[in-house]
Image: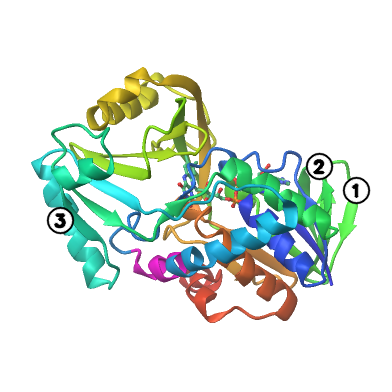
Amino acid sequence: MEIVIIGAGVVGLATAWRAAARGAAVTLVDPEPASGASAVAAGMLTPVSELAYGEEPLLHLGLASRDRYGAFVAELEELTGLDTGYRADGILQVAFDGDDLAYLDEVRRFQESLGVPAETLTGRESRRLEPMLAPGVRGGLLAPQDGSIDPRRLTPALLAAGEKLGVRLVRRRAASVIVERDTAAGVRLEDGTEIRADQVLLAAGPWSGDIGGVPEGVVPPVRPVKGQVLRLRSRVPFLTRCTRGLVRGSPIYLVPRADGELVVGATQEELGFDIRVTAGGLWELLRDARELLPGITELEFAEVSAGLRPGSPDNAPVMGASALPGLVLGTGHFRNGILLTPVSADILASVLLDGEVPEVGRPFTPQRFEVRA
Ligand code: FAD
């Protein structure tokens, strides 16, 4: 089985590894591997605390992926000898004022109604867990099984794992999908070179809608949703675990790494393919982070960046065979692509190699949009 994958973000990289491990000959096409959202993402692994009303189907996918993470990372780290910064030490969500606390209580009730436990904490208990929290923090929720990973360590490990199993990396832009007799037959690069394959996986994040040759009605309904993040640094970790907060209704999160990096995110902006960092975006992040954790002003500034989440109409991924035989879609992972990496790779490898969508992936096939169309 020959497979060509357009896009080497977390989705393309992890699927390449999984498919190669099952014996497929895989070619990955990307002019700049892991340069999209996967390079900017904070790496929270949180199906529970990220949950929003109306996104219940995503919960099961997210839980399935979170539960696969430990084994996925252990296999990846053993194969490559590279550390991914994975940790499963819980995520704390805290409320800054009384209104934020009322909202957090709603969140707790919603999570309970879905059967996902979160531990309720007072302000004092929250500060006992995270002593740097502001004295006024009113209360919290602890999702003990959530965690985080460093996407900037995960992607090199996935690249190395693929390389070990013979995945070929072509550092060029894919211009179009080759279509012959109404079937996808490979990929044409921007210089005209053709790469023939039995199956094509389109996993180019928010750019997945811009590849030529894909018939109208098959083009995945993805759009870019901008997010700005800030990276600070301290000699010792400033927080012990990933901490999310609501500050006067405004959400903020801080993700610590073992090496002292602290990722502060993120804005959510509908501005098309715009990755400019703005003064306003930065100000919002710093304003809310400082309210929650006044000590962050002492930390060293390291970096600011912006990335594009591949958003879909229902905020859930689009994974499975498309209406064009030979073309599989793997995109639309929006806010959860890092969390969903292990389960997405398993689903997409199964679609590519067995022609079957595993049970857990059935609510997320492209057909849900084709039917509506
Ligand atoms: P991408 O990572 O965007 O990769 C797409 C790849 O396609 C790129 O490498 C690009 O070069 C390539 N490409 C584009 N066009 C072409 C072409 N024509 N030919 C060949 N290659 C092409 N998720 C979480 O689970 N937890 C988080 O905490 C989290 N935080 C986030 C914070 C921010 C600010 C952002 C922006 C995202 C965050 N996400 C998070 C979401 C997550 O990053 C994405 O869902 C995920 O990275 C999507 O992966 P992808 O492989 O689909 O796309």
For image coordinates 44% across by 30% down, the residue present is 236
Distance from the alpha carbon under mark 3 to that under mark 1: 57 Å
User: Magenta stretch?
Assistant: 55-62
The residue indicated by pointer 1 is 193
Of marks 2 and 1, the one in the foreground: 2
Q: Is residue 281 magenta?
A: no
Indicate which disc, 3 or 1, sits on the residue closer to the N terminus.
3
Looking at the rendered structure, which numbered label has been put on residue 105?
3
Distance from the alpha carbon under mark 2 to that under mark 1: 10 Å
Indicate which disc, 3 or 2, sits on the residue closer to the N terminus.
3
The residue indicated by pointer 2 is 172
CB contact under 8 Å: marks 2 and 1: yes
Viewer-nearest residue: 358 or 81: 81
- Asked if residue 219 shows in the view, the reply is no
> Residue 349: x, y in percent?
69, 70
Circle 3 residues within 10 Å: few <14, some 14–19, many ≥20: some
Viewer-nearest residue: 167 or 2: 167
Task: Name the magenta segment's main secondary structure.
Answer: helix
> Residue 26: x, y in percent?
81, 61
Distance from the alpha carbon under mark 3 to that under mark 2: 49 Å
Q: Amino acid at mark 2?
A: Arg
